[in-house]
Amino acid sequence: MSRVIRVGGAQMGPLQKSDSREAAVSRMIKLLDQAHEEGCNLVAFPELTLTTFFPRWDMDDQDEVDRYFEEEMPNAATQPLFDRAKEYGIAFTFGYAEIARENGTRHHYNTSILVDEAGNIVGKYRKTHLPGHADFDPDRAFQHLEKKYFEVGNTGFRVWRFMDGIFGMCICNDRRWPETYRVMGLQGVEMVLLGFNTPSSNSQRQSERGDLRTFHNDISVQAGAYQNGTWVVSIAKAGVEDGHELMGGSAIVHPSGEIVAKSKTLDDELIVADCDLDECTFFKETIFDFDRHRRPEHYGLITQQTGVVRPD
């Protein structure tokens, strides 16, 4: 049985503070229409697909913050996307800011969902590695307040049997941490779906070149793919949002670490690749055969501590 999945990476251009959910979903549907014309089985959208990247602003009014969050999914604004995807029989994933009610308490997460061809939500991931800071920082060129607005995710790095394969999800800064891919790799992951919103400049290091930031983005997802024998679909929100530029660089990465499709713009753009899940097998059974080659008895520090402990 063929396990080739035609993947559409649906990069989104900028969303302004004034843009409505309905406007965002309308653009998502246009990309979904294009993916249908291209024969895609699966479409991946970015992190925080429905709104501008709001952690760049310092807000203390919780009602103001909550306007960027969704309490239900699907909801009235996103139902047309679910309906169109179901009509086409296309699975999809996208990220949004989630208010979850757990044990009678409201929680705020940076979330991504996995939706099957029939429009059912079959997987949910909440961002683990929150970047940035929790309090206003006057020394930054702009703010990155994810630690203020989101809680650390409580899902862990799960995988799902999905579309004849094993799929996982992560979000933005998660891609920079090798543990992200390895935990999923140890569950046999064959495709990692991730969305990101990454500034084109470093708020703490204005001299950092844009091409270096692109290199850091690419090397993170390429290494994760190669070292775990998995496809990685890494999709950006890009362009200038309310005067702040987000980098593009959406990519579909082969288990060899090679980029097989990459975006060329900072706007709405669909990239497409035929991804044969069976191509993971060679890497998983040779150089990255974990059962034969891993030595976890020597990896204890990875889970025993967070910060660096230097020798005396």
Image (tube, grey):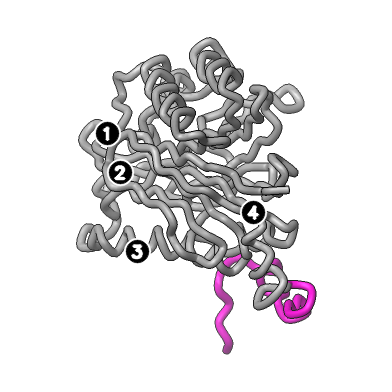
In this rendering, position of residue 62 left or right of residue 170? left
User: Mark 3 and mark 1: span between their CA atoms?
Assistant: 22 Å
Q: Residue at x 56, y 36 (%)?
A: 42
Amino acid on which disc 1 is placed? Glu
Q: Is residue 119 placed above or below 215 in the rendered structure?
A: above
Give the image location of residue 140, x and y in percent: 28, 50
Which label's residue is closer to the chain start, 3 or 1? Answer: 3
**Mark 1 or mark 2: which comes first in sequence?**
1
Label located before the other in sequence (2 or 3): 3
Please name the residue that numbered disc 3 is placed on. 215
Residue 266 in the image: x percent, y percent? 27, 41
From the image, tell me which residue sits under label 2: 246
Q: Which residues are magenta?
A: 290-312
Q: Real-space Cα distance between discs 1 and 2? A: 7 Å
Q: Pointer 1: what residue?
A: 241
Q: Secondary structure at mark 2?
A: strand
